[in-house]
């Protein structure tokens, strides 16, 4: 997300390696044990994964969240807007933020 020089893009080989890591971890571990996912389908669609064609949509605020560098908690860091910050881990625990019925609406 954002604008940066193309020299900072990862190579095709690195992209493939990360996607294979995500796929292999999803095979080895149930999501509840090790929630390894890729953003925007990164690593989802693989012939190695059972039911890999059944992407159910974005999990932001449903089963995943992001934490900004200053501790802000959002359903997804790609939203890039402070109005989606649900709290801050420096002020409240992640559990309290996650379980708050007013969060992630």
Image (cartoon, rainbow, N blue to C red):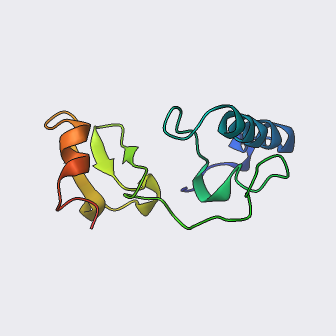
Question: In the rendered view, does 6 fall on the left or right side of 80?
Answer: right
Q: Residue furthest left?
A: 91
Closest to the observer, 39 or 4 = 39
**Residue at the image position 61 percent from the left and 50 percent from the top:** 4
Instruction: Tell me residue 84's x, y (percent).
Output: 29, 61
Closest to the observer, 23 or 33 = 33
All told, the count of numbered labels is 0
Q: Quadrant of the N terminus?
A: bottom right
Instruction: Tell me residue 92's x, y (percent).
Output: 15, 38
Closest to the observer, 54 or 64 = 54
Q: Quadrant of the C terminus?
A: bottom left
**Residue at the image position 13 percent from the left and 36 percent from the top:** 91
Is 81 situated above or below 47? below
Question: In the rendered view, does 34 fall on the left or right side of 65?
Answer: right
Residue 67 found in image quarter: top left
**Residue at the image position 26 percent from the left and 55 percent from the top:** 85
Question: In the rendered view, does 68 fall on the left or right side of 57?
Answer: left
Instruction: Tell me residue 102's x, y (percent).
Output: 17, 62
Instruction: Tell me residue 31's x, y (percent).
Output: 54, 41
């Amino acid at each position: 997300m954002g604008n940066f020089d193309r020299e900072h893009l990862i190579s095709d080989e690195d992209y493939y390696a990360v996607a294979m890591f995500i796929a292999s971890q999803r095979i080895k571990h149930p999501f509840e044990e090790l929630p390894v996912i890729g953003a925007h389908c990164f690593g989802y669609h693989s012939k190695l994964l059972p039911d890999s064609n059944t992407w159910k949509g974005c999990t932001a605020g449903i089963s995943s969240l992001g934490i900004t560098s200053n501790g802000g908690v959002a359903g997804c860091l790609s939203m890039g807007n402070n109005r989606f910050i649900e709290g801050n881990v420096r002020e409240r625990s992640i559990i309290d933020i996650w379980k708050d019925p007013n969060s992630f609406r």
